[in-house]
Amino acid sequence: GQNIDQPTEMTATEGAIVQINCTYQTSGFNGLFWYQQHAGEAPTFLSYNVLDGLEEKGRFSSFLSRSKGYSYLLLKELQMKDSASYLCAPLGTYKYIFGTGTRLKVLA
Amino acid sequence: DAGVTQSPTHLIKTRGQHVTLRCSPISGHKSVSWYQQVLGQGPQFIFQYYEKEERGRGNFPDRFSARQFPNYSSELNVNALLLGDSALYLCASSWGQGNSPLHFGNGTRLTVT
């Protein structure tokens, strides 16, 4: 079957670090993507992992463990504009499966 | 460069009617995917087209159909609309059908009354 599990909601303070976890099960695996979606807007691409390990991209990093079906998105030096939903999306055979997303609230 | 464009942005229909949603991908992108997103949920996969052929279909009834044109633009058709079809319909394009990131349009907000 195909299943994705992420926390529904997280709260953090401006300037802090937050880790959003994602566990997944998919039919076929061709990598895992993270997307950011602000309320009322379309999702935008953040990061991609196909091999195990950490990918760093400025304030955002993403980690993948294929054997554990696990990924996380790490956001450093949080800013108010980071308040959004973060979608974990493993790529199966020809299709991305999106989780419900984690709604992150950044407080001043 | 223009991003993914979708039309219309908003639409109100009555139960039983049909609707056609349109999408133009980023220039050079050959793959178009359609997603349905209801409030508080992640996007649900409906279809993927690559080089004008259907390459994937999600768990949606046959009332949902789509096609991709020679210029790679795409249409999503929904027949016999139900109240539960009310959602944001997102189109996303990508360069290939494999591991290239999706670029989303701003979506069409469909309300069925």
Image (cartoon, coloured by chain):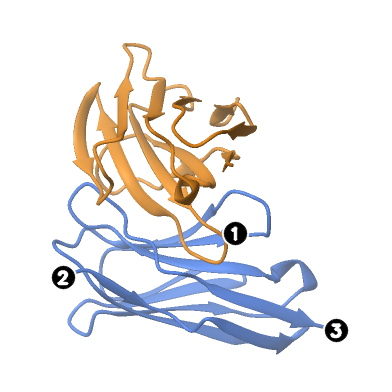
Chain colours: A blue, B orange
Q: Position of residue B105 (x, y in %)?
A: 55, 37
CA distance separating discs 3 and 2? 41 Å
Is residue A57 visible in the rendered structure shown here? Answer: no
**Residue at position x 25%, y 68% from top?**
A51
Q: What residue type is labelled 3?
A: Ala
Question: Where does residue B36 sit, x and y in percent of width and height?
Answer: 44, 48
Residue at point 40%, 48% (across, down): B101
In this rendering, the label closer to the viewer, 2 or 1: 2
Q: Say whether residue A58 is left or right of residue B35.
A: right
Which chain does the numbered disc 3 sit on? A
Q: Which chain does the numbered disc 1 sit on?
A: A
> Amino acid under label 2?
Gly
Q: Which quadrant of the structure image shows residue A3?
A: bottom left
Residue B70 showing in the rendered view: yes
Where disc 3 sits, the SS reads: loop
Q: What element carries label 2?
A: loop
